[in-house]
Image (cartoon, grey):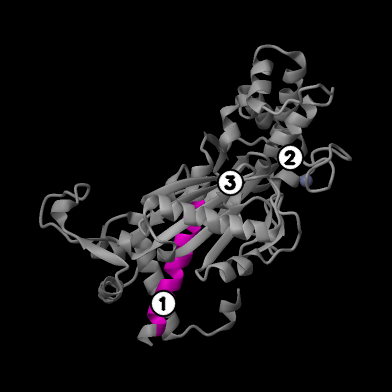
Amino acid sequence: MAGHQRISTANDQRENGRQQVFEAIRQAGRIARIDIARETQVSPATVTAITSELLSAGLIEEITPEGDRTGAKRGRPRVALKVRGAAHLIAGIKISDRSATVILVDFEGQTVGEYDHELPGPVMSPEEMVSLVMRALAGACNAAGRDISEVSGVGLGIAGLIDATRNFVHWSPSLDQRNVELGRMLSDAMPVPFYMDNDANLVAKAEQLFGEARNVSDFIVITIEQGVGMGIVIDGRIYRGERGCGAEFGHTKVQLDGALCRCGQRGCLEAYVGDYALLREANIRGSAQPEDDLSALYARAKAGDAMARSIFDRAGRMFAMGLANVINIFDPSLVILSGEQMTFDFLYGSDVLDRVKSSVVQVDAPLPEIRVHKWGDLMWAKGAAACAMEGVSELTIRNLGADAA
Ligand SMILES: [Zn+2]
């Protein structure tokens, strides 16, 4: 926000132009210069100047029309531009309670390699997390036949309250300490730009770039895994709040003095619908063999086991109340329910959706669309890579300006 106090200079305008043009190329996949000018409102002469800078920096490349099957139009073929994949190697890492999932992508977003690194346990010290990230990165590079020194940027997604503007972890269920300068520790271990975010924001980013929310400017993503997360996109940008602690849907209260949550407070939505909450309920009776398999519990509910059913029914009702509250506050055009647990339909079954509808403020206009998107840790890692890709693009283009000045 410091930017608005400065008077914008010709250099700033040129840099904004570069960022805009590059972003237009990335979004389009392949695009001709004249179409960039039309979409960005930057003059054709400036587009030509900027694209030749980007070309000589190796960030983009020209495509011959013969090779461009999608752009086959009658008339004189136009040369298209695209991001040059080989320009940068980017890593995205998602840390869940079971594993660190790594995806390596080129600068175009094409997958170069995938890797899964199993965790010894769900909670670790900050030092252990740094060494875990380094091991997972090395493993991924090794498996893809690349050297770790080739990586130009790393995106990291972890659960919790993350201040993405300064790579600071207020609190994470994966760490045994609060207030961790994780970004600084990681940069000390590996001198490349690190970009961190709450994993729900990364899913929102991935939905926006590759998923269900392409060309949607106002939408909400709700992620359900161990915990419940939310990513809010307003006018095409992720809304983060002042301290980077916004959108904590999982810790909105649905019951006064209710069930105990991992965050230490009571009555949070997550304490009723998160994986751990469902298993905790299932184990309340005590047994020689504690229930630790959510799929098995769900199968029992489906088969008519009354206790198992009551666990999922309550979770569904609590979730419906939370979702209706979100719609009442934001009135988004689209809500995406996203995550692995989406394989269990108790959170989006017709009775849950009916309950949401009856709790949303009634007007003579259709309700926001609710879409279900099931995906695994790999797509979360892809969201992390997407964040790093954006960050590295911005940085590279800024440096381009500094070199030119
Ligand atoms: Zn909580």
Q: Which residue: 25% across, 64% down?
A: 61
Using the numbered discs, state the Cα–Cα distance from disc 3 to disc 1 in whole angstroms. 31 Å
Q: What residue type is labelled 2?
A: Glu
Counting other residues with Cα less than 10 Å from the Cα at mark 2, is it few (<14), some (14-19), or many (20 or more)? many
How far across and down, in percent of the image, does residue 6 sit? 55, 84
How far across and down, in percent of the image, does residue 266 sit? 85, 43
Using the numbered discs, state the Cα–Cα distance from disc 3 to disc 2 in whole angstroms. 17 Å
Compared to 101, does 162 lie above or below?
A: below
User: Residue tagged by mark 3?
Assistant: 220
Q: Evaluate whether residue 366 shows in this view.
A: no
Compared to 318, does 287 lie above or below?
A: above
Counting other residues with Cα less than 10 Å from the Cα at mark 1, is it few (<14), some (14-19), or many (20 or more)? many
Front one among 315 and 33: 315
Q: Which of marks 3 and 1 is nearer the N terminus?
A: 1
Using the numbered discs, state the Cα–Cα distance from disc 2 to disc 1 in whole angstroms. 43 Å
Most distant residue in the right direction: 257
* Callout 2: CB less than 8 Å from ligand 1: yes
Task: Please report the bounds of the magenta region as a residue range.
Answer: 383-402
User: Residue tagged by mark 1?
Assistant: 15
User: Residue tagged by mark 2?
Assistant: 270
Which is in the foreground here, disc 3 or disc 2? 2
SS state under label 1 = helix
SS state under label 3 = strand
Tell me whether the residue at label 2 lies in contact with that at label 1, contact meaning CB atoms closer than 8 angstroms.
no
Q: Which amino acid does label 3 sit on?
A: Ile
Q: Which of marks 3 and 2 is nearer the N terminus?
A: 3
How far across and down, in percent of the image, does residue 307 sit? 77, 17
Which is in the foreground here, disc 2 or disc 1? 2
* Callout 1: CB less than 8 Å from ligand 1: no
Q: Which residue: 15% across, 49% down?
A: 73
SS state under label 2 = helix
